[in-house]
Image (tube, rainbow, N blue to C red):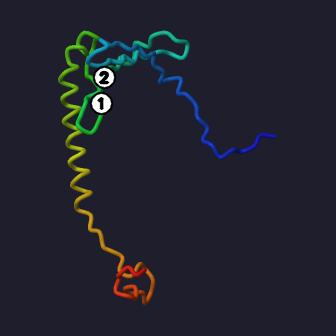
Amino acid sequence: MAQDTGLPDIQLDGAGLYREDMFTDRKAGSIRRLVPVTVDGHTDPSRSVLYSGQTQLLTPTGVLPLGFEIDAQSLEEAVGKFPAAVKEALDQAIEEAREYRREASSRIVVPDVGGGLPGAGPLPGGGKIKL
């Protein structure tokens, strides 16, 4: 008797498989090439090869990992477009951080008077420490 564990039924999409190739210069970052394949592992020419890049930038608050898509038709083109894609991803990350900061600063914090207890007021004794 099979028990229902409540976990989702996770299955791979056989029509959406890719072979992953990684390329790196061991300095600036890496490029990932995803080659579409059929369920038997052969290259699927009906779908496009996808390229993405990854790098890390050192900031005053630590390392910032960046991941981004590269619109390219070949590895050579992806290598050539890598610097511009990094700049675009960094600009987007900076804008998202600014937006997050704006949202955080616009929140109004209302202090909870009396600690949330009905009828509670200041503590007796004027708040002075007595030994």
At which x and y percent is residue 6? 65, 46
Image quadrant in which the C terminus is located: bottom left
Mark 1 neighbour class, 10 Å CA radius: few under 14, some 14 to 19, many 20 or more:
some
Disc 2 is placed on an element classified as strand
Residue at image position (29%, 28%) is: 68
Image quadrant in which the N terminus is located: top right
Disc 1 is placed on an element classified as strand
Q: Give the answer, above or below, for where 24 lies relative to 71.
A: above
According to the picture, the residue beneath numbered tag 2 turns out to be 53
Left or right, 39 with reference to 122: right
> Number of numbered discs present?
2
Q: Give the residue type that dot 2 points to.
A: Gly
According to the picture, the residue beneath numbered tag 1 turns out to be 66
At which x and y percent is residue 122? 37, 85
Task: Tell me if label 2 and label 1 are in contact, CB under 8 Å.
Answer: yes
Q: Earlier in the sequence, mark 2 or mark 1?
A: 2
At which x and y percent is residue 114? 38, 82
Q: Give the residue type that dot 1 points to.
A: Leu
Viewer-nearest residue: 110 or 88 = 110
At which x and y percent is residue 126? 34, 86
Residue at image position (20%, 43%) is: 95
* Residue 55, image quadrant: top left
* Residue 52, image quadrant: top left
Mark 2 neighbour class, 10 Å CA radius: few under 14, some 14 to 19, many 20 or more:
many
